[in-house]
């Protein structure tokens, strides 16, 4: 950061530039290749173009200092015509320098066109004065309070609002470095957005809760069914003595015991087709 | 303002009181302008070729501060403007 300690330092810095101006170059022309920078633009010295550029930057800064240390312009000396003077219907009291402000942008445009010593600073003026005071971005800064405070917040103190605004602007100026993964510090995420997100999450959770209840009911219904299945299996083991549903017994049962002819059927009493486990002595009460 | 302060008519006294209140309120806001928060205001003010640093010198004079001091508005804003120009415009050429 350049520190201006005294006027002598500034004058020493300005002296080289002023001498350059007096020695034939009336104004600093950044498009003028005939200056001493052209030796760096020769093909043999291509690698030395950087010093020329740094000199140009130094000249630009020197011109800014020269602008600051020179006395302000007098509106009377400037060639802009007071528009009120041509208006014969206007109030004579208003035709005075008090109520007439010279056009600053026109002055800077003239400096650039005439390639004066302040021509380099005209781009700064162009950037700054092109900001429209009643533009959308500027107007939006007045309603920053609504962006910070949600509709449901009513007890936030002014200090808290100020801190929140400062933190948001700081994060925005540092390209959201403070934001990280925390949405509360995200400069682009307002409280209203967060509130809407919260409501959406609540709705989602509510829906999930419904699904969860359904799953619980379904699992509750599945549990007795599983218990019933287990009991059925146990029953099958128990009923292995001769249940109809016992497929093993059916498979294991030999068909050779059955005879399809009637004569053999009458001889079943001698050789029972029932499995041996169901013999009379094993049956209850047998 | 000096001429208005001498007036004795009622509506002129009221007007003077209103203007003084407005100036007091604006002064309160402008004293909180720093190179960090109000760089746009400072730059726009300095780029006015018919004012430059004149207004800041008036502020210093109103608060009995020497404009050449390091803590004065004039010096601080002048350095802030030069730093802004150096960073935003001169750095592109280097």
Image: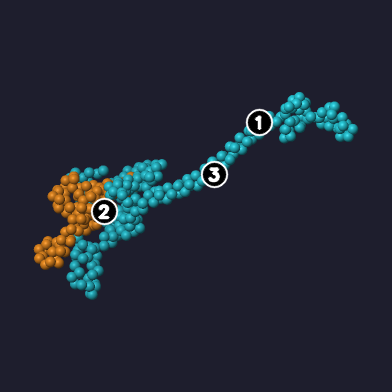
Residue A72's x, y, as percent? Answer: 20, 56
Residue A170 appears anywhere in the view: no
Mark 3, other Cα within 10 Å: few <14 / some 14–19 / many ≥20 = few
Q: Quadrant of residue A98?
A: bottom left
Q: Dot 2 lies on which element?
A: helix
Disc 1 to disc 2, C-alpha distance: 90 Å
Q: Is residue B8 left or right of residue A18?
A: left
Which label sits in the foreground, 1 or 3? 1
Outermost bottom residue: A89
Which chain does the orange colour mark?
B
Name above or below for residue A164 compared with residue A236.
below
Chain ID of residue with mark 3: A
Question: Residue B64 or B77: which is nearer the viewer?
Answer: B64
User: Which residue: 28% across, 52% down?
Assistant: B40
**Same-subunit check for callouts 1 and 3:** yes
Q: Is residue A211 left or right of residue B88?
A: right
Mark 1 surroundings: few (<14), some (14-19) or many (≥20) residues within 10 A:
few
Label 1 element class: helix
Q: Residue furthest top?
A: A281
Name the subunit of mark 1: A
Residue position marked by numbered label 1 in the rendering: A234
To which residue does mark 3 refer?
A: A214
* Residue in the image at 64% along x and 35% along y: A229
Q: Which mark is residue B41?
A: 2
Q: Secondary structure at mark 3?
A: helix
Taking depth in this image into account, of A100 and B94 the one nearest to the observer is A100
């Amino acid at each position: 950061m350049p520190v201006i300690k005294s006027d002598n330092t500034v004058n020493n810095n300005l002296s080289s530039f002023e001498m350059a101006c007096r020695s034939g170059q009336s104004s600093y022309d950044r498009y003028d290749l005939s200056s001493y920078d052209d030796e760096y633009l020769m093909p043999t010295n291509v690698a030395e173009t950087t010093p020329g550029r740094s000199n140009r930057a130094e000249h630009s800064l020197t011109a800014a200092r020269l602008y600051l240390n020179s006395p302000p312009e007098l509106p009377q000396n400037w060639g802009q015509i007071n528009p009120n003077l041509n208006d014969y219907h206007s109030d004579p009291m208003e035709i005075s320098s008090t109520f007439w402000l010279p056009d600053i942008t026109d002055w800077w445009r003239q400096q650039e066109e005439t390639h004066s010593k302040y021509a380099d600073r005209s781009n700064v003026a162009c950037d700054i004065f092109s900001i429209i005071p009643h533009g959308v971005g500027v107007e939006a800064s007045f309603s920053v309070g609504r962006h910070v405070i949600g509709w449901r917040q009513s007890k936030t103190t002014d200090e808290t609002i100020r801190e929140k605004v400062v933190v948001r602007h700081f994060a925005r100026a540092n390209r959201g470095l403070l934001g990280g993964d925390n949405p509360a510090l995200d400069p682009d995420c307002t409280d209203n957005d967060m509130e809407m997100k919260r409501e959406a999450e609540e709705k989602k959770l509510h829906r999930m809760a419904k699904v969860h209840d359904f799953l619980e009911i379904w699992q509750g219904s599945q549990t007795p069914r599983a218990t019933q299945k287990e009991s059925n299996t146990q029953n099958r083991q128990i009923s292995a003595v001769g249940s109809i549903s016992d497929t093993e017994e059916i498979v294991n049962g030999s068909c050779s015991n059955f005879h399809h002819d009637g004569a053999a059927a009458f001889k079943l009493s001698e050789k029972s087709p029932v499995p041996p486990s169901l013999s009379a002595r094993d049956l209850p009460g047998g | 303002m000096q001429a208005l302060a001498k007036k004795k008519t009622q509506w002129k006294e009221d007007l003077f009181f209103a203007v003084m209140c407005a100036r007091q309120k604006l002064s309160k806001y402008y004293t909180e302008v720093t190179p960090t928060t109000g760089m746009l205001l400072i730059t726009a003010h300095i780029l006015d070729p018919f004012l430059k640093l004149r207004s800041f010198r008036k502020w210093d004079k109103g608060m009995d501060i020497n404009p050449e001091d390091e803590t004065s508005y004039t010096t601080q804003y002048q350095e802030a403007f030069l730093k802004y120009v150096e960073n935003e415009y001169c750095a592109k050429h280097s």
